[in-house]
Image (tube, helix red, strand yellow):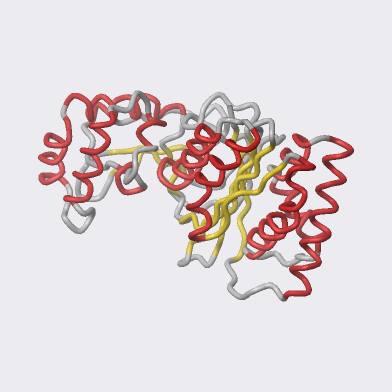
Amino acid sequence: MAQRAGSADLPLHGGQVQKWLADRMTHLGAVMSEAIVHHYGRVELLCRLAHPFWFQSFAAVTGMDWHSSGITTSVIGALKRGLAPLSNELGIHVCGGRGKHSRKTPQELVAIGERVGFDGSALANASRLVAKVDSAAVQDGFDLYLHEFIVTHGGQWVVVQQGMNGDRKQARRYHWLSEGMKGFVEEPHSAIDGVGQGEIINLTDRRARASRRCQLGVLHSVGPDGIARELSAEVRPSDVLTPRLYANLAAAADRGPADFAELLLVPGIGARTARWRWWPRSCMVRRTASPTGRVFRLRTAARTGIRFLCPFGPTIRRSMC
């Protein structure tokens, strides 16, 4: 399985890296990656890229030594260009990218899998699920716009993706590693390091397990029609587009997801649908103490009176790979 290896907060900047610097990063990044693979192995390179601090240091050594959101885009672009000619020799492939390129990641993984022999369809699902967890299951105010999936011939992988918060003028980078995690949707984060962003919606907390299970139960037992009746009574039209939400829930009901991960993989199930402020009170999570030192409170949703789990305050730093 996989684990969320960490995150980093960065100032949000625009602009473009100059060609001479991009070329330097491409060549130097490829040489450094090649040396790590030859001396320590492919998995070690993945593990290092999954470490937010090492990734930041790697960017500085290759020449991108600004504390900026552009670090992620520049380093990932340099690795994709530099490792492409060496992919068969090193057994490492860099997929995805920024914007429209990020949406091509599943197709790239399937194509590579057909050539080298790993299960590309399974990795395509992993790519989609990692993106859904960081955008829909954990809603921290950062909208994903970059998704990079680096995979070896053996099927091990690391994901580096980034979201932006335009109001705060910040970006946040997320790192995932395909080793050591028990599941995608329950406390997948092995390390988080960043400035507290206030209250967020977190459906991956272990205490939200009953809520996730109840949401699936309501979807199967009540169905989209019953949910729509609750929606019309408790949520204003300005809060969500009712016809679109109904269509998304109908699609989810037709697929019959067996667990919350399968539900997140249904097309159209995103942040607004996963928020589900109108679930019955039996789906809510009671206030409990946090064994990890994180503080959680139950916030009351505006105008609905229905509560959902929200962590708040500074994020924590835990051990990484």
Residue 149 percent across, percent down from the top left: 60, 45
Q: Is residue 133 above or below residue 205?
A: below
321 horizontally vs 131: left or right: right
User: Which is more toward the observer, 239 or 281?
Assistant: 239
Residue 271 x/y as whole percent: 36, 47
Extreme-front residue of the structure: 115
Which x, y percent locates residue 33? 81, 48
Which quadrant holds the N terminus?
A: top right
- The image quadrant where one finds the C terminus is top right
Q: Quadrant of residue 310?
A: top left
Q: Is residue 252 left or right of residue 297?
A: left
- Is 286 positioned to the left or the right of 6 in the image? left
Q: Is residue 3 above or below residue 8?
A: above
* Relative horizontal placement of residue 242, taking residue 309 as reference (left or right): left
Residue at 72% x, 60% y: name it. Answer: 78
Residue closer to the observer: 45 or 110: 110
Residue sitting nearer the eye, 115 or 317: 115
Q: What residue is drawn where x is 72% and y is 40%?
A: 46
Residue at (37, 25) in percent of width and height: 259
Give x and y (percent) for residue 58.
78, 54
Picture quadrant where residue 65 is located: bottom right
Q: Quadrant of residue 92?
A: top right
